Image (spheres, rainbow, N blue to C red):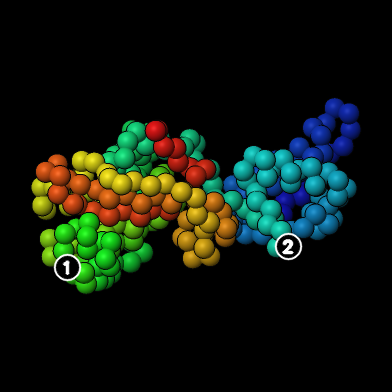
Amino acid sequence: MPSTEGLTDGKAAIPLYQQVIDIIKNDINSGTYKAGARIPNEFELAESYKVGRVTVRRAIEELVQQGYLTKQQGRGTFVNAPKLKRKIRQKDDVQSFSDACRVNEMEPGARIVSRKVLPADATEAQFFGVPAGSELICIERVRTADGIPVMLENNTYVYEDNAFLAKADLTDQSIFEVVREQTGRGPARTEPCTLEIACASPEVARLLSVPTGEPLFYMEAYFYDEQQRPFIIGRQRIVGSRYVFDI
C-alpha cells in the first residue's frame, strides 16, 4: 500500500502536490513500488492521500517528466527502472562496455541470458569468410552499470575459433578481454556500424527493466581485429535514457 503519512495543508506547508511527489518517490525508492509495477490510479491515490484528483494528476505528471513514471495508454501508469546518476558515455565504436563504465566511474556487470551455436546465414558467412551454415556461437547477455540494466548484448563469433566461449565464465566479465586472453585478438575497427531506433518487445523490456514498447537504440556492428580480419558481429539493444554515443 502507498504511504499516507506527512500530508499537511496550510500556507506555510509544502504544496500538497509536492508532498504527493515526495511520498511516491519514497515508495519507489523503498521498493513499495518496484520497477515495472503499475501504481494505483488517480482516484485510488486521491482516496489514500485524502487530496483532490487534480493534485494527484499534477504530481503524476511531474513524476513522468522527471522520468520516475511512464503512462501507457489504456493500461495505467508504471514505475520506471532506477535512474543512473549519469549516463554512460561511449567515446568510439570499439570501446568495450566495461571500459566505458570504468571511464564513467561505474561498476560494469554482465548476466548471461543464453549461449547458442547457430548456422551462419548468408550475410554472416560473407563477413566471416566461411561457408554458409558454418557454426557460429552467439552469446546474449544483459549488461549493467552500477547494477542497473543498460543493454541487451548479442555477440556472435566463429565457433571453430572461439569454442572456449561455450563454457567460459562470462558473468561480470568483458567478453573482449576474455577473447583477447585466449586468442590474442581484439576489436580495432567497425565497418559497417549502424544505429537505429527499435521498440522493446515484452521479453526485452523484462530483461532491461523498461516498459514494453520503450524506444531503444539498436546497434549492429561488424568488428575487425588489429590484422583487419573479421572478428565479431555485435547486435545490441541499448536503453537510450542510460547511454550516450560520442559521434
Query: Is label 1 in a helix, a strand or a loop?
Result: loop
Q: Nearer the viewer, residue 56 or 73?
A: 73
The spot of residue 8 in percent (x, y) is: 84, 39
> Is residue 66 in sight in this rendering?
yes
Q: Identity of the amino acid at label 1?
A: Pro
Q: Identity of the amino acid at label 2?
A: Gly
Query: Residue drawn at (33%, 61%), measured in percent from left and top?
Result: 140
> Is residue 21 in sight in this rendering?
no
Q: Is residue 123 above or below residue 215?
A: below
For residue 231, side relative to residue 77 (left or right): left
- Near mark 1 (Cα within 10 A), the count class, few <14, some 14-19 or many ≥20, is some
Give the Cα separation between the discs numbered 2 and 1: 49 Å
Residue pointed to by mark 1: 131
Query: Residue drawn at (34%, 33%), measured in percent from left and top?
Result: 91
Q: Nearer the viewer, residue 110 or 24?
A: 110
Query: Is label 2 in a helix, a strand or a loop?
Result: loop
Which quarter of the picture shows residue 121?
Answer: bottom left
